[in-house]
Image (cartoon, rainbow, N blue to C red):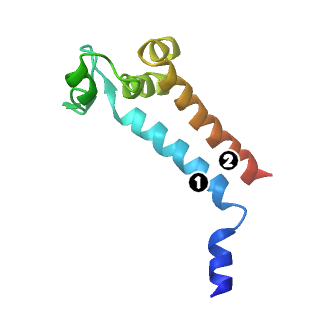
Amino acid sequence: MIKFIDRLLKPPWWVWPAAMIAVAAVTLAASWVLTPGVDEFCYLGETRFGGECGFTMVTGLPCPQCGMTRAFVHAARGHLLRSFLYSPAGLGLFLWIQAGGVIGVMRLAT
């Protein structure tokens, strides 16, 4: 039993770099699947993705996460300024996740 718990608490060295790569790949793929629309929303095929923000509906103010999806979608396409204008935190988070994926690749390669 102790060996089993030890194995859970100390996974093989490659687990964390592989997880970093997986998170970066899923984030990039999801950002590419959604397409930006001309009406300030993102679309999954022909269907609008997401709805009105609950925080905005209640307070009338934008929440700190408003624009994150649009920021991810535009950052994945290389439109960094547009991404920054939608959500500076969204651009920073997207770049941070992608940098983690690159670091994961480098750690697995060395």
The image position of residue 72, as x and y in percent, is 44, 28
| Mark with earlier residue (1, 2) | 1
In the rendered image, the quadrant that contains the N terminus is bottom right
Q: Is residue 68 left or right of residue 100?
A: left
**Hey, which residue is sitting farthest right in the picture?**
110
Residue at the image position 39 percent from the left and 27 percent from the top:
65
Res 19 → quadrant: bottom right
Q: Which residue is mark 1?
A: 19
Q: Nearer the viewer, residue 64 or 71?
A: 64
Instruction: Using the image, determine if residue 16 lies above or below residue 83.
Output: below
Which amino acid does the dot numbered 1 rest on? Ala
Q: Residue at x 60, y 48 (%)?
A: 20
Crowding near the residue tagged with mark 2, few <14, some 14–19, many ≥20 C-alpha atoms within 10 Å: many
Image point 66% across, 53% down: which residue?
Answer: 17
Q: Secondary structure at mark 2?
A: helix
Rendering coords of residue 54 (x, y %): 23, 30
Whole-angstrom CA distance, mark 1 to mark 2, is: 8 Å
Q: Answer left or right for 12 relative to 78.
A: right
* Numbered circle sitting on residue 51: none
SS for dot 1: helix
